[in-house]
Amino acid sequence: MKRVPGLDYDVLDDLLGYTLRRAQLAMFASFDEATRGKHLTPPRFTALVVIGANPGLSQTVLGRVLGIARSGAIPLGTERSRAGCGTGVRKAPRRGEWICGSA
């Protein structure tokens, strides 16, 4: 969100929520520019970093870290293997659980 020169934003500049939203939009634009063509989103990036730093991470824990349901963690975990960064996820002994691999 770019500022319009000469426009009075009144109290908006004093509101924390408005300022945070502007910062978030600027961060997303910067992230998009830096990752253009890599099909990488902030949640995917977060998942890849957490998986890479924690070999053997379960789908449940990855979901908890990302604030999403366990089943939603699998598509993010498999991004690692698609990116050539390891095996992604594999079936764990407990039914319905997956473990994120590192090799």
Image: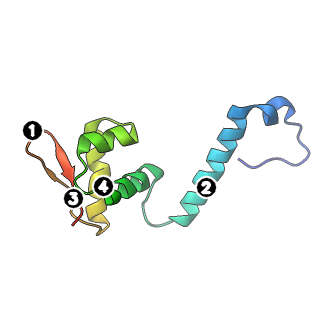
Sequence-wise first label, 2 or 3: 2
Q: Which residue is mark 2?
A: 29
Q: Which residue is mark 3?
A: 101
Q: Give the Cα separation between the discs numbered 4 and 2.
A: 28 Å
Sequence-wise first label, 4 or 2: 2
Q: Give the Cα separation between the discs numbered 1 and 3.
A: 17 Å
Q: Which callout, 4 or 3, points to the residue nearer the camera?
A: 4
Q: Is residue 51 left or right of residue 97?
A: right
Sequence-wise first label, 1 or 2: 2
Mark 4 is on which residue type?
A: Asn
Q: Determine whether 18 is above or below 80 in the image.
A: above
Q: Which callout, 4 or 2, points to the residue nearer the camera?
A: 4
Mark number displayed over residue 74: none
Q: Is residue 33 left or right of residue 63?
A: right
Q: Give the Cα separation between the discs numbered 4 and 3.
A: 9 Å
Q: Which residue is mark 1?
A: 95
Say whether marks 4 and 1 touch (CB < 8 Å): no
Q: Which callout, 1 or 2, points to the residue nearer the camera?
A: 1
Q: Give the Cα separation between the discs numbered 2 and 3.
A: 31 Å
Q: Which residue is mark 4?
A: 54
Sequence-wise first label, 4 or 3: 4
Mark 2 is on which residue type?
A: Ala
Q: Determine whether 53 is above or below 17 in the image.
A: below
Q: Who's the residue at 24% across and 62% down the image?
A: 102
Q: Where residue 71 appears, x then y in whole percent?
A: 25, 39
